Image (spheres, rainbow, N blue to C red):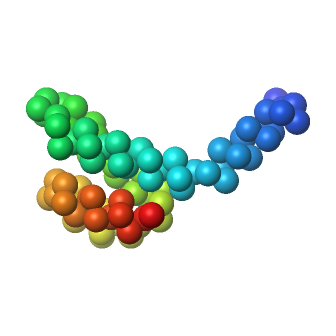
Amino acid sequence: MTEYTRYQKGIIQRFYENRGHIAIQKLSEIVSNLYLEDSEAKRKRSWNAARKHLKALGFHDHEIEATIGDEDLGRLAKLVEQAF
């Protein structure tokens, strides 16, 4: 197993402390990108990324699947707003 330096341990610790903030920021970017995106393949990747970040924030599976399954951008934006 790799031993990390004190500096590296600090970076890892701060990442996990701010994981929720990072997920909220990424979701905000995804909402913006989905609104502007024309490519179906990129939209699909963005919705999958949104699913991952919503799970990281602790939203319930039924709420995530309802939003992602319907590809409801308005509902996704409301979930991001709730996370703030």
Task: Report x, y in % for residue 45.
Answer: 27, 37
Residue at the spot x=38%, y=68% of the render?
82
Where residue 67 sits, quadrant-wise, is: bottom left
Q: Quadrant of the N terminus?
A: top right
Q: Quadrant of the C terminus?
A: bottom left
Task: Report x, y in % for residue 35.
Answer: 17, 43
Residue 65 visible somewhere in the drawing: no
Where residue 42 sits, quadrant-wise, is: top left
In the drawing, does residue 1 fall left or right of residue 64? Answer: right
Residue 32 visible somewhere in the drawing: yes
Task: Report x, y in % for residue 13.
Answer: 74, 46
Residue at the spot x=88%, y=36% of the render?
6
Between 49 and 14, the one nearer to me in the picture: 14
Task: Report x, y in % for residue 24.
Answer: 44, 53
In the drawing, does residue 84 fall left or right of residue 37? Answer: right
Residue at the spot x=17%, y=34% of the render?
37
Between 24 and 68, the one nearer to me in the picture: 24
Residue at the spot x=87%, y=31% of the render?
5
Between 80 and 70, the one nearer to me in the picture: 80
Position of residue 77 relative to residue 12, above or below, is below
Position of residue 62 relative to residue 25, above or below, is below
How many numbered badges does the structure rendering display?
Answer: 0
